[in-house]
Image: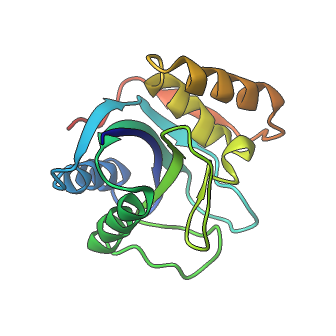
Amino acid sequence: MIRRAYLSIGTNIGNRCDNLQRALQLLVKNPAIQLTAVSPLYQTEPVGPVKQRSFYNLGLALNTSLTALELLDWCHVVEQSLHRRRLIHWGPRTIDLDIIFYQHQVIELPRLVVPHPEAANRRFVIQPLLDVSQDDPQTQRQLELMLKQTRDTNWVHRLDDQGVTI
């Protein structure tokens, strides 16, 4: 069975465009994943108390035959391949892949909660996903409502002159 999933990807260490490009290339090495849309590139303000460089973020829409947990495991493989280290909560990272939505399901497991519990509080997640969910009215409505109701005031800038392709 093919399912639609939406991911948020971010990076703020090293060559941010290259990190995102490599993450996309690794993600689709799994034959059970087909990217259907990649958002424009966004530069975003870091969240939390740690002083750090701004992030580059993308939103992705994909079709997959993987279960939600299998997709999570593959996202962790991609992160590890790009040397993701979890040293500081909300700290700098080479790459971060989060499952935001998975086939309009609500999932509450010890390792995975979907919709992502912080998505509604993160403009850097909402805005790029609005760009890639045009063909999914239910997700579009959910994201539009999240954007309208979010209390996140951090800046989010679309970088039209730069991009990441697959």
Quarter of the C terminus within the rendering: top left
Which of 59/161 is in front? 59
Q: Residue 65: give x, y in percent of width and height.
A: 28, 48
Residue lying at 24% horizontally and 54% vertically, measured from the top left: 22
Q: Residue 113: give x, y in percent of width and height.
A: 61, 59
Residue lying at 55% horizontally and 37% vertically, measured from the top left: 104
Q: Residue 26: give x, y in percent of width and height.
A: 21, 57
Quarter of the N terminus within the rendering: top left
The quadrant where residue 156 appears: top right
Which of 52/132 is in front? 132
Count every numbered label the image shows and give the total. 0
Q: Residue 140: give x, y in percent of width and height.
A: 58, 22
Please say if 72 is above or below 88. Answer: above
Residue lying at 52% horizontally and 32% vertically, measured from the top left: 129
Tell which residue pokes out farthest to the front in this image. Answer: 1
Q: Which color scheme does this rendered protein use?
A: rainbow
Going by the image, does 34 lie left or right of 5? left
Going by the image, does 135 lie left or right of 18? right
